[in-house]
Image (cartoon, rainbow, N blue to C red):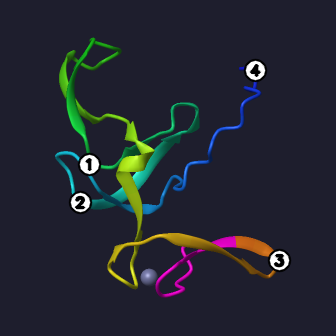
Amino acid sequence: MRNKKTVEKHPIHVKSGDKVVITSGKDKGKVSSVKKVITSENKVIVEGANIVTKAQKAQGGNQGGLIKTEAAMDSSKVMLYCSACEKATRIKYDVIDNKKVRVCKKCGERID
Ligand SMILES: [Zn+2]
């Protein structure tokens, strides 16, 4: 178990499974899903984006070699994608059935 930091970090605006648009870098404009959120580093891993080649050691029955994998990227480089607007959007919070949910700021489509 890691100790919780006393400094409150700004929460990442996306979570695992969210559809996002990449707003900068070589994958700019790409729409994909968030595979993983690394809160402690304020980074996200997006499926098929920011691909890097890594050397992998032989392990079990697998041969070692070069593998392509997604590298984490700064969470500021992705924006939530609204499937109703068909573009990147900003979100706002709404309360539905006493639950805080994220909705598209433009069209009101529920994201959660
Ligand atoms: Zn929308």
Is 84 situated above or below 77? below
Earlier in the chain: of badge 4 and badge 2, it is 4
Q: Position of residue 57 (x, y in %)?
A: 27, 11
Q: Quadrant of the C terminus?
A: bottom right
Q: Which mark is residue 19?
A: none
Q: Which residue is mark 2?
A: 30
Q: Main secondary structure of the magenta part?
A: loop
Name the image quarter holding the N terminus. Answer: top right
The residue lying at 16 percent from left, 46 percent from top is 26
Picture disc at residue 3: 4
Residue visible at 54% across and 54% down in the picture: 15
Q: Report, in whole angstroms, how far the alpha carbon at label 1 lies from the one at label 4.
A: 32 Å
Residue 48 among those drawn in magenta: no
* Residue hosting label 3: 98
Q: Is residue 50 above or below residue 22?
A: above
Instruction: Provide the secondary structure element on which disc 3 rests.
Output: loop
Q: Where's ligand 1: which quadrant? A: bottom left
Indicate the amino acid at tag 3. Answer: Asn
Q: Residues within 10 Å of mark 4 (few under 14, many from 20)?
A: few
User: Taking 66 as reference, is 92 left or right?
Assistant: right
Q: Is residue 19 visible?
A: yes
**What is the quadrant of residue 88 in the picture?**
bottom left
Q: Residue at x 21, y 45 (%)?
A: 25
Between the C-alphas of marks 4 and 2, the distance is 36 Å
Residue 46: % across, % down: 36, 48
Q: Which residue is mark 1?
A: 48
Dot 2 and dot 1 residues touching (CB under 8 Å)? yes
Front: mark 1 or 4? 4
Q: Earlier in the sequence, mark 2 or mark 3?
A: 2
For marks 3 and 4 on the same chain, the one whose residue lies earlier in the sequence: 4
Identify whether 8 is placed above or below 78.
above
Judged from the image, the secondary structure of the residue bearing numbered disc 2 is: loop
